[in-house]
Amino acid sequence: EIDQLSADALVLDVGSGRGDFSSIISRRESLALDIYPYPEVDIVCDLAQVNPFKENSFDAIVLMNVLEHVYDSKVFLKELAKLIKPGGKLLVAIPFLLKVHQAPFDFVRYTQFALEKLGQECGLAVASLEGYFDPMFLVEQGSNNLKHTVFPGLPRLNNYIARGLFAIGSLFTAGVAALVGGGFTKTPQDEHSPAPIGYHVVYRKD
């Protein structure tokens, strides 16, 4: 999506953090914005509270794993929509089946239907929406939960037995993972699994 923008496009990376995606976003002229003053950030600001930009300023805005940390997502997206030029894009990656992270600032999980409706209510059309699917990742997450949060609370004998069975099960899981393969992206309508790890959404401002 970044590479498809015009050579003189201006991109705003909202919630840029330590610049995990800067190698991609910096292929075009870009600004990094976050509410925390990391060294990699150009502008420190909470757009839900103060919006320092003129309307129709950016060809694209990027939200990589940010939206779940915004309590009032609709207000936030409406502010972002003002900043996108007509025909411009809002690029979103957001988790769905993922553990709580960056507590206590982890607020929401959205289904594909909610993401579509949220865009409509903020004046943004869904240009594309795909899910990221990885069944073995879900197995791994459940296993880690058992190992680190459930087993320590068991009586000693039960703990030893459970860990032994867990080790055997891990070998079985590794074999299944080798056969199943890794994660993949697909439009939710084309994938029979109802369990995406997260979504990639491209909104367009018409």
Image (spheres, rainbow, N blue to C red):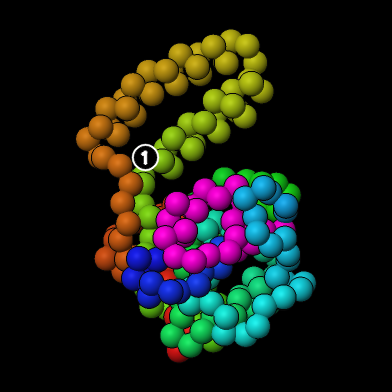
Q: Is residue 194 visible?
A: no
Residue drawn at 38 percent across, 75 percent down: 6
Q: Is residue 148 above or below residue 98?
A: above
70 lies above or below 139: below
Amino acid type at image mark 1:
Met
User: Going 54% across and 80% down the picture, which residue do you hit?
Assistant: 84
Q: Label 1 crowding class (10 Å Cα cut-off): few <14, some 14-19, many 20+?
A: some
Residue 65 colored magenta?
no
Query: Dividing the picture into quarters, in which one does residue 153 lie?
Result: top right
**Relative to 64, is 189 on the left or the right?**
left
Q: Position of residue 169 (x, y in %)?
A: 38, 23
Q: Nearer the viewer, residue 183 or 190?
A: 183
Would residue 185 appear left or right of 147 to someone viewing this image?
A: left
User: Residue 175: x and y, percent?
Assistant: 27, 27
Q: How many marks?
A: 1
* Residue, far left: 179
What's drawn in magenta, residue-wise?
Answer: 14-35
Residue for point 43% across, 85% down: 87
Instruction: Indicate the quadrant where residue 138 lies.
Output: top left
Residue at point 63%, 11% (across, down): 156
The quadrant in which the N terminus is found is: bottom left
Residue wearing tag 1: 136
**Farthest front residue?**
8
